[in-house]
Image (tube, grey):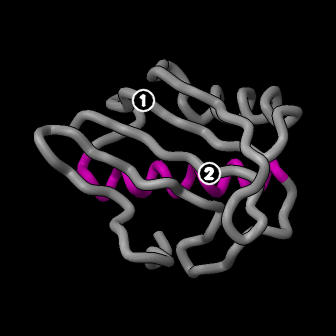
Amino acid sequence: MATPGGHYSHVVVANGMAFISGQLPITAAGQQLNSAGFEDQAKQVLINLQAALEAASTSIENLVQVRVYITNINYWPLFNTIYAQWADAALPARAVVPVPELHHGFLIEIEALALV
């Protein structure tokens, strides 16, 4: 994971839960994918979410809730397909929320809660 761009942690573990901050499409080397297409941004955000889960010694199977912010509701079907492949059998509670814009012009951001 890239170093956080603000005063926060990517993941905080408390009381048996991993609270994962909003993950943006930024590579581990710090490259911002804001000019990439939605599919590439979505895949990078899920890579970042998985890295945060691993940093908290947990996994996709332990996700409890996922909140997804997208800048265009028309991205929902593509995101749902990418997410289903990534999550496989895991079925945490999930919300997909259309928003007018995200930081740095990104198209997607994901935050999550998992058991550790």
- Nearest the viewer among 64 and 101 is 101
**What is the three-letter code of the residue carrying label 2?**
Glu
Residue placed farthest to the front in the image? 100
Q: Nearer the viewer, residue 86 or 38?
A: 38
Give, as a three-letter code, the residue at label 1.
Answer: Gln
Q: Does the magenta stretch include residue 40?
A: yes
Quarter assignment of residue 116 = top left
Residue at left offset 82%, top offset 33% = 73
Could you tell whether 59 is left or right of 96 in the image?
left
Q: Which residue is drawn at 73% across and 44% down?
A: 99
Of residues 32 and 51, the one drawn nearer to the viewer in this rendering: 32
Instruction: Tell me whether circle 2 and circle 1 mark residues in contact (CB < 8 Å).
Output: no
Binning the other alpha carbons within 10 Å of mark 2 as few (below 14), some (14 to 19) or many (20 upward) gives many
In space, the residues marked 2 and 1 are separated at their CA atoms by: 14 Å
Residue 109 is labelled as 2
Q: Is residue 1 magenta?
A: no
Q: Residue tagged by mark 1?
A: 65
Picture coordinates of residue 61 (x, y %)? 38, 29
SS for tag 1? strand
- Horizontal and vertical percent position of residue 96: 65, 31
Element at label 2 = strand
> Taking 115 as reference, is 63 left or right?
right
| Magenta region | 38-57
Q: Within the image, what quadrant is residue 101 found in?
A: bottom right
Which is more N-terminal, label 1 or label 2? 1
Within-10-Å neighbours for mark 1: few <14, some 14–19, many 20+: some
Instruction: Say whether residue 58 is left or right of residue 32.
Output: left
Residue 102 percent coordinates (x, y): 70, 58
Above-or-below relation of 69 to 6:
above
Q: Residue at x 25, y 56 (%)?
A: 12
Residue at point 53%, 36% (across, down):
67
